[in-house]
Image: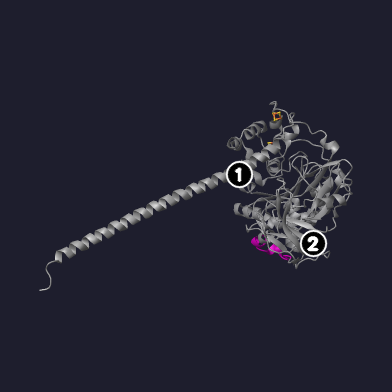
Amino acid sequence: MQDSAVERARNAGKRLFHFHGGLRLHHHKQASCQVAVQSVAIPPRLYIPLMQHAGPEATPLVGTGAHVLKGEPVARFNEPSIGYVHAPTSGTIAAIARQAITHPSGLEGLCVVLKPDGLDRWTRLQPMEHWQSADPELIRQRLCESGIVGLGGAVFPTSRKVEEARNFGIHTLILNGAECEPYISCDEMLMREQPDKVVLGALILQKAVAAEQVIIAIEDQMEEVFSALQAAISNADCTHMRLVKVRTIYPEGGEKQLIQVLTGLEIPAGCRPPELGLLCQNVATAAAVAEAVTEGKPLVQRIVTVTGNGVKRPHNLLALIGTPISTLVDACGGYTHDAARLVLGGPLMGYALASDQNPVIKAANCILVLSNRDIQSDQAEMPCIRCGECARVCPALLLPQTLNWQIRNDLLDDASDSGLGECIECGCCDYVCPSHIPLAEWFRFGKSEHQLLAMERSQSNLARDRYLAREARLEQLKQDRERRLGEKKQALRDRTSVTGGTMGQGPA
Ligand code: SF4
Ligand code: SF4
């Protein structure tokens, strides 16, 4: 990355810029922001999925019948930088079984089923009392052991992001509080109610990556958040921390879009923000970091927005990971008579859930319950009329109509060359498409198919390499054998000629 770009990144937030496209949407957040965040009662069973982010499932560390305390590890990921899955409360392991998990695929996954004992007793917690003077590596290890992941939806392991950031050298930590998707308000409520924790988490992350400054970015309509965070920053006496209001436009909270707004720099395809000296983290992740480090508490709960016309009393709820979604809906007064569809996430990036028995996962920022009124407008897909509206709003500067055509025609490599990997699945193109083509859904499908293709290719390349290596080995063995045989024959010939030379002489 050029030095001038890195220098420009250092001035992040001093001047604001625009990104291409995007949408101005009605944000529908008031309904769930009327009352304070409430805790959901512990349900009779918790279903803790062992696949909470990309990659393979974690391996269970407990067996059926074992008693666990809140915060004890119940499974471990094989990759050391991801860490553990923890018991969200104390109780007995009722089963370890495959069942429907909260995932766009709708497939089953391995879950630890926990029967709570009702005592909610913590395991022995080990706060890092002197984190200010601790080795940054110890902080990173703590984040890993505590199962901290990005809570903005991507659920990327935070310890791995911190490690990558340290390798590149970071000057600016950006806390992303620009919760731009309509209906979702869990971050807004967290920043209003626990601004000190967010600021503390920012300071810990700053220490972990040795950043010179911190920027907390929020939307310009978040007035209450602004006052709360401003007070928390001055209480903590952070001279190197700034609060920046960004325009309310979707998808301003996307990592690349937010960086572009704060720095004017476009992150090139294939590059990561740390290459510019920037690290982006969600505000809820920062709060989880503060709990993990200063209280020793692993990530076992999160705030979930439960909202939409299909639920009686929209709320933000603090729920244990593994709580069935039906429990959250009940805590909001239940479904309205015309509730019709459950969505995990917001209306643009979320995905439909098959059942309300699916459990809350770390990525669950919002449960959106749509009513018949909301989905009456679902219209049949029609052919593309090449109007170009999708390209006009695409924040990643892609040509969605071309990508769509390529994927539908199995031209996955062409789609990849056209920038499919840069699609952030924001759904802006779907939103404006007059032909009602589910473009983002096709792009999600295209990405997973292309990934599969790449895996198959790498497996067949591996098989071909193994075959060629075996052929070369056999050829080498053959040559060695022939050489040894030749040497033996030669030795025999030499011996024979020596023996022949002394024959007939006999003893005197
Ligand atoms: S918005 Fe829809 S109809 Fe228009 S070009 Fe894009 S895909 Fe085609
Ligand atoms: S979903 Fe992808 S292609 Fe469509 S607007 Fe968003 S980034 Fe562009």
Q: Residue at x 72, y 46 (%)?
A: 106
Q: Is disc 2 placed on a helix, strand or loop?
A: strand
217 in relation to 128, above or below: above
Determine the CA span between mark 1 and mark 2: 37 Å
Q: Label 2 is placed on what type of residue?
A: Lys
Binning the other alpha carbons within 10 Å of mark 1 as few (below 14), some (14 to 19) or many (20 upward) gives few
Image quadrant assignment for residue 16? top right
Quadrant of ligand 2: it is top right
Image quadrant assignment for residue 72? bottom right
**Residue underneath mark 2:** 115
Image spot of residue 77 (x, y percent): 65, 58
Image position of 484 (left or right of 243) = left
Give the residues drawn in magenta, as a range. 127-139
Which quadrant is the N terminus positioned in? top right
Q: Label 1 is placed on what type of residue?
A: Leu
Viewer-proximal residue, 437 or 129? 437
Residue 395 seen in the figure: no
443 in relation to 277, above or below: above
